[in-house]
Structures are given as structure tokens and as C-alpha cells.
């Protein structure tokens, strides 16, 4: 093989690996939003689609003319750690009201290629008024208009809506604001990743709260694994019995989905069959080859597996990170509960939160209230749980093995005031340990 041919092979391998990691971080990539990333995915769509189908059982659709690539990630269990977020200062997660408006608005967009913000709001008002299970959208209220704008801004970020004239934010100040949109109805239909559409379940609204867990399990039912693949145990995500081939396919996908999508994969969280698959020669070979093809570095310890992306392409959110108060607090809380035998009690966490607020009196202004210490501790623990560094057991917060990778080396603060008060910590730095706990 010539030198040029070798270089082309290496270039393709590197681009496929880069494309995998880009799609893992952002399952919807648009040409308008990230032209360079979309170009890689467009050019390498065939090997990328084959890798995701074989490794994780996920489908990848690339539409070069429409300018988007959509990876449909399917999980066997619900995961609320990555909510939709408001694209404003603070990036607060969507609440129930905004999710309802998101679903109704997306449904109404299917009927119109072009619309205005006023006409779209009217359609949503009529749709919510006609459904007895939904509270009607009231555009006379500023809070309602703000929720509606949060939904529209999210759809704009997806590429579903394109503002041709006017600014979406203007609707917050006045319901008479003029904004003209172009709608990509095809992309609207690509947004849901669940294999089964909710409308196909045909469940009376009054039964939804009573059968919620069952309905969630049915939405992610995948027939390719046999027996309808209705989970026998929704918590474990195990499918109903199928053929031996289907069972092995499920084991491969269930393990590798979590390996590539979660911060840490612990052996304690795997079923006996999944552990046996990972320990088998075939399973280990597939796991290691898939990791190499994606351009990750595999850390395999007695406790589990962790993937390191040295380029941080596949990382949608980072830890340690000083981008938010909760993440800084999480690292400081982690340090203080590492030696807590049996985990930290809620009272101990509140005491830690109080200590941090006293230590940095000008920091975390949103938490400077009567219940601020508790909220700070709760948010910090949520960060640790989302990153697989802790979990709650019997009311206590218990660190998991990956947490012991981190050791706080110092906090960076702004200059002290003349009265001696310490300003807010600008960052908390950590050292990653290179040994297993």
C-alpha cells in the first residue's frame, strides 16, 4: 500500500473517531449550528452509521440537503440527569410546564412551513384549551410568555425554527411582538428518539399517572431483541426472552450504550449476564475495539470502566469545572465527605454547606438565604450523582469509587476586601489520582 493510501486510511479512521465523539456529545448536529462538525459527519456517514448500529444499536440519520444529522439514542431506563435547559443566564432546567408547551408547540409546527410567533401562540392556546388534561396557555401573563419563549429558543437551537424577521425574546415584553419563522417539519419529526411514539400507546389521560413507569418502559420497547423486547424488569432494563442471538445482541448494546453514554460504568450496576458478557473473550474484544475506534482511552479497574476523551469532544458537561456554583461546591463537598464512614447524613451535608457559605460570604449569592445551605448541599450532591461519583443509600450520600480520583489541590479566590472578608472562590482545582481506590 502506498504512503498516500496509508495517509488516507489514517485520516478516515481519525475522522470517524472524531465524528463518533461529536455525536455522543451532541446527538443533533446542524450545518447552521456547527458547520465543521456537520461536514465530518456528512462525509463519514456510512462508517458512522455502521459503528453506532453495531456498537450501541442506535440509528444515525444524516440529511445533507437539509443540513442536519440526528443520532437517536435509546436508553432502557429513564435518565433525568440531562434535562432540556433554558437558553438564558443560569441555564435552569425545563420544568413540567415548559415540557408540556414543548410537546404541544412541536405538534403544531408540523402543519405550517412558515408562521409568526403570534399565530403559533394562538395555535398552542387553542390546542391546550381543547385538551382537558392540559392547562391552557395564557399569553396575557409574562411568566407564560417567558415559558413559551424558552420553548421557542430551544427549538431554534435545534434548527427546527429559523427566525427570518424579528427576535423571539421580544415576545416576553409584549404579546404583540412580530417574529416570522421558517419551520423544518421534517426535523421536528426526527426529534423524538423513543422507538415507540407516545400516541401509539392509546392510554386514557387519567391512567397515565397510575401507569407511568410501565408507559416509559413501553416507549423504549425494541422488537429487535425478541419477545417484543418489553422489559421484564423496567428498573434493570432486561428484555423479555428471545433467541440466543437476540439475547447476545441485547447484552452487547446494553453494556456499550452505558459505557459510551454514562460518565462511569460500575460492575456493581451490571446484571450477572452483563458481567459474564464483559468477562467473555468476545465481549472484551468488542468492548476494547469499539473504544479504540471511537478514539477514547479506556480505564479498566476492579470497580468498573471509564472512558477518557483527551480532546473533550464527547463531553457535554465537565467535572471539575468552575462554570457553576453547584460544580465548585460539589468538588469541595466531595473533599469533606471522603472520610465519612457509611456516607454523609443530610444533617452533615447541611453543615458542610453552611461552612462553605461562612468561609466564602460573598460567594453563591443565590444560596444566601435561610435554606441556602441545604439547597447548596443538595445541588452539589446532585452534581456528584450525575457524574457517577456518589449515590444515595438509605438517606445517606455515599461516594462511589470514581470519586477518589479527585483530590482538591486548592481554591482560587478573588482579592480579599480591606475588612478581611474573603471573596467568592473563582475556581476549585483538583488533581486526578492515577491509582485505583
Image (tube, grey):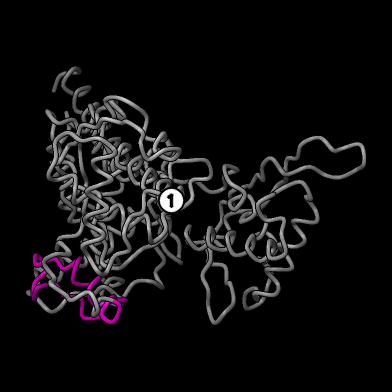
List x then y, in percent, for residue 317.
46, 46
List x then y, in percent, for residue 147.
40, 49
Q: Is residue 414 left or right of residue 206?
A: right
- For label 1, the crowd category at 10 Å Cα-Cα, with few meaning under 14, some 14 to 19 and many 20 or more, is few
* The quadrant where residue 414 appears: top right
List x then y, in percent, for residue 278.
29, 65
Q: Is residue 107 left or right of residue 307?
A: left
* The quadrant where residue 378 appears: bottom right
Q: Does residue 5 lie above or below 221 as drawn?
A: above
Which stretch did the figure color magenta?
209-235
Residue 98 counted in the magenta span:
no
Which residue corresponds to mark 1? 141
Residue in front for this viewpoint, 142 or 277: 142
Residue in front for this viewpoint, 225 or 374: 374
Q: Quadrant of the N terminus?
A: top left
Q: Residue at x 18, y 71 (%)?
A: 218
Residue in front for this viewpoint, 77 or 107: 107
Amino acid at each position: 500500500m502506498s504512503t498516500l493510501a496509508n495517509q488516507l486510511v489514517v485520516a478516515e479512521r481519525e475522522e470517524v473517531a472524531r465524528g463518533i465523539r461529536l455525536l455522543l456529545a451532541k446527538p443533533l448536529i446542524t450545518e447552521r449550528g456547527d458547520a465543521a462538525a456537520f461536514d465530518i459527519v456528512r462525509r463519514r456517514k456510512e462508517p458512522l452509521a455502521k459503528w453506532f448500529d453495531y456498537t450501541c444499536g442506535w440509528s444515525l440519520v444524516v440529511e445533507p440537503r437539509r443540513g442536519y444529522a440526528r443520532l437517536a439514542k435509546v436508553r432502557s431506563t429513564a435518565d433525568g440527569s440531562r434535562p432540556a435547559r433554558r437558553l438564558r443566564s443560569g441555564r435552569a432546567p425545563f420544568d413540567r410546564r415548559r415540557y408540556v408547551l414543548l410537546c404541544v408547540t412541536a405538534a403544531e409546527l408540523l402543519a405550517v412551513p412558515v408562521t409568526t410567533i403570534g399565530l403559533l401562540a394562538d395555535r398552542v392556546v387553542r390546542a391546550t384549551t381543547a385538551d382537558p388534561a392540559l392547562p391552557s396557555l395564557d399569553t396575557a401573563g409574562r411568566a407564560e410568555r417567558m415559558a413559551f419563549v424558552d420553548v421557542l429558543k430551544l427549538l431554534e437551537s435545534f434548527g427546527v425554527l429559523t427566525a427570518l424577521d424579528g427576535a423571539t425574546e421580544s415576545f416576553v415584553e409584549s404579546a404583540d411582538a412580530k417574529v416570522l419563522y421558517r419551520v423544518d417539519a421534517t426535523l421536528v419529526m426526527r426529534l423524538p428518539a423513543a422507538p415507540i411514539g407516545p400516541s401509539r400507546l392509546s392510554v386514557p389521560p387519567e391512567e397515565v399517572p397510575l401507569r407511568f413507569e410501565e408507559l416509559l418502559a413501553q416507549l423504549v420497547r425494541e422488537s429487535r431483541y425478541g419477545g417484543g423486547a418489553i422489559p421484564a424488569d423496567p428498573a434493570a432494563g432486561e428484555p423479555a426472552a428471545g433467541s440466543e442471538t437476540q439475547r447476545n445482541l441485547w447484552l452487547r448494546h446494553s453494556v456499550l450504550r452505558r459505557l459510551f453514554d454514562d460518565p462511569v460504568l460500575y460492575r456493581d450496576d451490571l446484571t450477572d449476564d452483563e458481567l459474564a458478557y464483559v468477562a467473555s473473550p468476545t465481549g472484551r474484544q468488542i468492548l476494547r475495539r469499539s473504544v479504540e475506534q471511537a478514539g477514547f482511552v479506556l480505564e479498566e479497574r476492579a470497580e468498573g470502566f471509564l472512558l477518557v476523551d483527551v480532546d473533550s469532544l464527547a463531553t457535554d458537561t465537565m467535572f471539575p469545572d468552575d462554570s457553576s456554583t453547584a460544580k465548585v461546591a460539589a468538588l469541595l463537598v466531595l473533599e469533606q465527605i471522603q472520610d465519612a464512614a457509611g456516607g454523609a447524613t443530610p444533617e452533615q451535608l447541611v453543615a458542610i454547606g453552611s461552612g462553605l457559605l461562612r468561609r466564602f460570604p460573598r460567594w453563591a449569592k443565590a444560596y444566601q438565604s435561610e435554606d441556602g445551605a441545604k439547597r447548596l448541599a443538595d445541588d452539589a450532591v446532585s452534581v456528584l450523582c450525575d457524574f457517577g461519583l456518589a449515590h444515595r443509600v438509605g438517606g445517606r450520600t455515599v461516594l462511589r469509587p470514581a470519586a477518589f480520583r479527585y483530590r482538591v489541590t486548592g481554591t482560587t479566590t478573588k482579592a480579599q476586601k480591606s475588612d478581611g472578608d474573603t471573596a467568592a472562590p473563582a475556581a476549585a482545582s483538583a488533581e486526578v489520582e492515577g491509582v485505583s481506590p
